[in-house]
Amino acid sequence: MESKKDLFFKIDVKTIGIPLLAVLVIWLVYWAEIRFGLFLNPYGVQPRSITGLRGIVFSPFIHGSIEHLYSNTIPIFLLSFSLFYFYRKLAAVVLIGSWLFSGAFIWFIGESYSTHIGASGIVYGLASFLFFKGIWSKHYRLMALSLVVVFFYGSFVWGILPGREGISWEGHLGGFIAGVLLALLYKKYQLPQKKYTWEEANFNEEEDEFMRHFDKDGNFIPSSELYPQGEETTTDITTMDDTKVSSPRIVYCLRQKTEGDKHSD
C-alpha cells in the first residue's frame, strides 16, 4: 500500500502519459485536416449559437496553422505535466474545468458570428491555477512552481486583453478566470508534508539523544561531560525504514597463548 508521500511528486505513466496523449490527439486532428482536406473550423465555439455549443468540447482540438499548434501544444504538455506531478488528485478536475469553463465563457461573451478554435483557454487555465494555487500554498515546492510559471508565461497576461485581431482574448480571459476560481475552490487543499521527530506532539527533549547535548540556554555539552568516564552508553541507529536498533557492542576477550598458536603470527 502506498503511503501519503508516495502519492505526490511522482513521475509515472499517468504523469507523463496524459500530457503526451493530449498533445498527440491535437496533432493527429491537425494531420487529418491536412491529409484528407478537412475543414473543422465550424466545430469551434460560435457564441450564442445552438450549434456553436459543440465547440465547447471540440474547439481545443482544432487549430488554424502549424504556428498556432506549436504555441498551444508545448505549453499544454509542460503545464499539464506540472499539474499531474504536483497536484495529482486535483489534476483531472482542473484540466476539465479549465477546458469547459473557458469554452462556455467564449460562448456567452464572444462576438456574434465569430468562431473560436484552439486550446489556448486551457493553457491560460492551467497557468493561472498553478500560479495562484502555489502562491496561496505553504509548500515551498509549489511556491517555486509559481515563480517558474511567471518566468515562462508571465507575458501571457497581455493575452486576456482585447485589441489584437484574430486572437480569442475571450478564451484567454475565460481560462484565466477558471484557473483563479479553481485555485480559490481548492485553496485549503494542502499536500501532506513530512513531519520530523521534533515536530511530533509527543516529542520529549530529555529522551532525544541529540537534544541532550544542549542545556536550557542552548550551550553545547560535549559527550565527555554528558557521560562521565566509565559510564556505559548506547546509541540508537535509525535504519532506512525508520526502525531503531542499538549500536553493536564490541567485546574483547583475552586468553593465554598456547603452543598450537605459535605459527599463527
Image (cartoon, grey):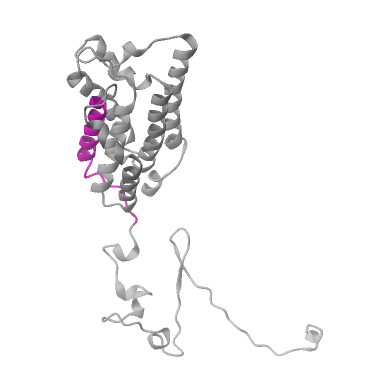
Prevailing secondary structure of the magenta residues = helix
Please, is residue 15 above or below residue 52 in the view? below
Q: Quadrant of the C terminus?
A: bottom right
* Picture residue at 33% right of the left edge, 43% below the top: 149
Please, is residue 109 above or below residue 209 in the view? above
Q: Position of residue 163 (x, y in %)?
A: 22, 27
Q: How many marks?
A: 0
Q: Quadrant of residue 82?
A: top left
Task: Tell whether position 189 is magenta.
Answer: yes
Q: Quadrant of residue 203?
A: bottom left
Please, is residue 190 above or below residue 248 in the view? above
Q: Quadrant of residue 47?
A: top left
- Let me know if residue 59 appears in the view: yes
Q: Quadrant of the N terminus?
A: top left
Residue situated furthest right in the rendering: 263
Task: Tell whether position 112 is magenta.
Answer: no
* Picture residue at 22% right of the left edge, 12% below the top: 113
* Picture residue at 22% right of the left edge, 21% below the top: 106
Left or right: 113 as drawn, with respect to 119:
left
* Picture residue at 32% right of the left edge, 11% below the top: 42
Viewer-proximal residue, 165 or 110? 165
Left or right: 84 as drawn, with respect to 36:
left
Please, is residue 25 above or below residue 18 in the view? above
Q: Which residues make up the magenta segment? A: 169-194
Viewer-proximal residue, 41 or 20? 41
Q: Position of residue 205 (x, y in %)?
A: 30, 73
Q: Position of residue 59 (x, y in %)?
A: 32, 19
Q: Position of residue 147 (x, y in %)?
A: 32, 48
